[in-house]
Amino acid sequence: MRQLKITPTVFILVLTIASTSFAQQSTTKSPDAAGRVTRILVSGDSLVQAQPDTAILTISVVTQAKQALQAQQQNATKTDAMLRALKESLVSAEIKTGGYSLQPQRIYKEGQPPTISGYEARNTLTVTLGDLTKVGSAIDAASQAGANEVGGISFVLRQDRPARDKALSEATREAMSKAQVIAQALGGRISRIVEVQEDGFQRPQPISQIQEFSVQRAQAVATPIEVGSLDIRSRVQLIAEIETNL
């Protein structure tokens, strides 16, 4: 009997395993999503008024005589009397010599050399006082003692730091206010302040008064003095970054 030979067939199943790689996702925003950053430059100005705290007087004794020695001696006598009068009326004032001169007085005629007709001596004192209410009385006392020339009066602010700080603060606030207005107009907000600079500070200019007083006037009426106020200016420049969606 014929036998059937069965040859086994082997089926090979090839399984292909696909590996999947996972990419890490980035969380950074695109430039469009983050918004646009714009830089602006603004300035702020301020004006602060302050009352002066110091007065500076320039008072002189002027004498004339035929001889230089006579002019000098007459001047020394009157200046000494003026000094004593000022020190009695102004206890805390600072008094110092501001200048001294002794010069010949010349007469000029056409076609002739100048001739000396006499001599003039001038002794100038600088008086600095903190009590502004005594400025008028100081002038009166000096005039009565022999002073015959008041070159001028200046009112200054020695302790100016509080007024300077106030002016700087107001100028900075004005600059910030301008930056905020621009940011709101652009539909954005201020993201950061890049730079702030004090562009300029103007110290208060002294209030000067040029006066001439005679002895007769000082004896008749007390000298009136109006102090007034000083102007202190400050300017600030500010660079800010504004973030908008435009």
Image: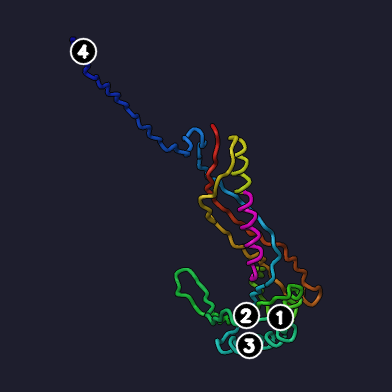
Query: Does the CB distance between marks 1 and 2 fall below 8 Å?
Result: yes
Measure the alpha-carbon separation of dots 3 and 2. Answer: 16 Å
Given contact means CB atoms under 8 Å apart, are the residues at marks 1 and 4 in contact? Answer: no
| Residue picked out by circle 4 | 4
- Of the numbered discs 4 and 3, the one sitting upstream in the chain is 4
Along the polypeptide, which appears first: circle 1 or circle 4?
Answer: 4
Tell which of 75 and 177 is nearer to you.
177
Question: Which residue is identified by label 1?
Answer: 142
Tag in front: 3 or 2: 2
The reply to whether the magenta stretch includes residue 167 is yes
Secondary structure under tag 3 reads: helix
Secondary structure of the magenta portion, mostly? helix
The stretch of residues the image draws in magenta is 158-174
Question: Mark 3 Cα within 10 Å, few/some/many (few <14, many 20+)?
Answer: some
N-terminal label among 1 and 3: 3
Q: Is residue 223 above or below residue 246?
A: below
Q: Which residue is mark 3?
A: 74
Callout 3, which amino acid? Gln
Which x, y percent locates residue 165? 63, 62
Q: Residue at x 35, y 32 (%)?
A: 19
Residue bearing the label numbered 2? 125
Secondary structure under tag 2 reads: strand
Residue 85 position in % (x across, y down): 72, 85
Q: CA distance from mark 4 to mark 3?
A: 164 Å
